[in-house]
Image: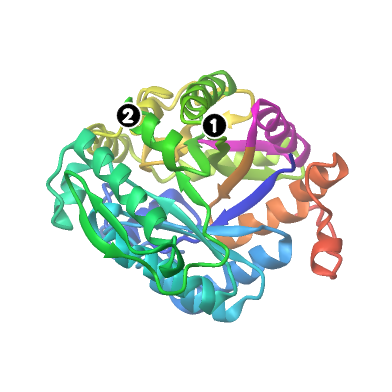
Amino acid sequence: MNVHLHWFLPTGGDGRTLVDRHAFSGGALERSPGGPISGMRAPDLDYLVQIAKAAEQLGFEAVLTPTGTWCEDAWLTTVALAQHTERLKFLVAFRPGVISPTLAAQMASTYQRLTNGRLLLNVVTGGDSAEQRRFGDHLDHDQRYARTDEFLSVVRGVWGGSSQGPFDFAGEHYRVDGGYTALPPDPRPEIFFGGSSAAAGPVAARHSDVYLTWGEPPQQVKEKIDWIRSLAEREGRNVRFGIRLHSISRDSARDAWATADRLLDDLSPEAVAAAQAALGRSESVGQQRMLALHGGERKSLEISPNLWAGIGLVRGGAGTALVGSHADVADRIEEYHALGIEHFVLSGYPHLEEAYWFGEGVIPELAARGLVEPVARRSGVPLAVAGGR
């Protein structure tokens, strides 16, 4: 079981600090009184192409593109980026509640043909009722997972194609008569799915190819793996596992931790409190688990060796980062891998520079340990490992 490495596309904006990114997205943090914060990078096509090309060259397999009010549409953005890359796959996040399952199956099929099979799907059921209502979705938390269960049943059924006959489905949330895709996707996109609640587990076990968790300490991750694996076994299925983390990797651990500290320099106590209040209203069990890792406090943010919860002070969703020397970060990846984690979806601020820090520093470490294929063999272009930056 090799490690699969993926990066992140900041389609909600990017920058050198956590304030930069949230300033573009209009999140919980306030803008600077003097206007736009310096160093903020808008997610225009030229900048996203830079990140996508860097990820492809450095040896990342795919890039995750988020979904929500605060970012660009993932389907449209990534199909544009596919025209500027050759091998890079796109892990497209989308919400079942705002699109027809038959249409989603058709879109995925078209996407695979347009990109020569470079689509992966990240199904986001949603944990924030206010955000869901912006898109006209008024179901509660558990109902949303029940709907996702039906949605994925329809998608897989429709992918059967006309050769297997039309697909009929009658459920609480969807009724489909004679559904099919004339040209099913080839290959069928892998489905990445996350959720920490009791309602999420059975859906993941029935439908996901890769169960994706946010970055918790290893023991908590192991408990999640054991939970989903046992549920999948009851369904007669085998589910693989992935983890979503940020990364701050440097030539020395001291430099990495200094970089982590600088990310918080522009955050006032009031800004952290406002962000924590907003995040605390989320219905997502996974989000509540992220908040519990630090309790809203700046002290004791290293919650496990080289696992830092500082990003979760202001960022929703993935709130932890691997911090340390390149060897330290590789050690932690190897530790999670030993638990059964196969896919690592990573990011860092700014996303262009941090892709290079990880790609030129950590990937060679992983390759030396036999966990990933050396980049030179994958791309045909050897990369020099940077030092002293």
Res 192 label: none
Q: Position of residue 6 (x, y in %)?
A: 61, 53
What amino acid is at disc 2? Val
- Specify few, some or many for label 2: CA neighbours under 10 Å numbering under 14, 14-19, or 20 or more: some
Task: Provide the residue designation for mark 1.
Answer: 308
Q: Secondary structure at mark 2?
A: helix
Residue sitting at x 20%, y 50%: 132
Q: Nearer the viewer, residue 359 or 268?
A: 359
Tell me if residue 36 can be seen. no
Residue sitting at x 65%, y 30%: 340
Q: Secondary structure at mark 1?
A: strand
Cα–Cα gap, marks 1 and 2: 20 Å
| Residue 180 versus residue 60 in the image, above or below | below
Q: Nearer the viewer, residue 21 or 232?
A: 232
What amino acid is at disc 1? Trp
Magenta region, main secondary structure: helix
Task: Provide the residue designation for mark 2.
Answer: 285
| Residue 247 versus residue 94 in the image, above or below | above
User: Which of the 4 quarters of the picture holds residue 371?
Assistant: top right
Residue sitting at x 66%, y 70%: 87
Earlier in the chain: of badge 1 and badge 2, it is 2
Q: Is residue 18 magenta?
A: no
Q: Which residues are magenta?
A: 320-341
Q: Nearer the viewer, residue 247 or 34?
A: 247
Q: Nearer the viewer, residue 185 or 299?
A: 185
| 374 sits to left or right of 305 | right
Q: Position of residue 389 (x, y in %)?
A: 75, 55
Q: Is residue 337 magenta?
A: yes
| 30 sits to left or right of 377 | left
Tell me if residue 214 can be seen. yes
The quadrant of the image that shows the N terminus is: top right
Closer to the camera: disc 1 or disc 2? 2
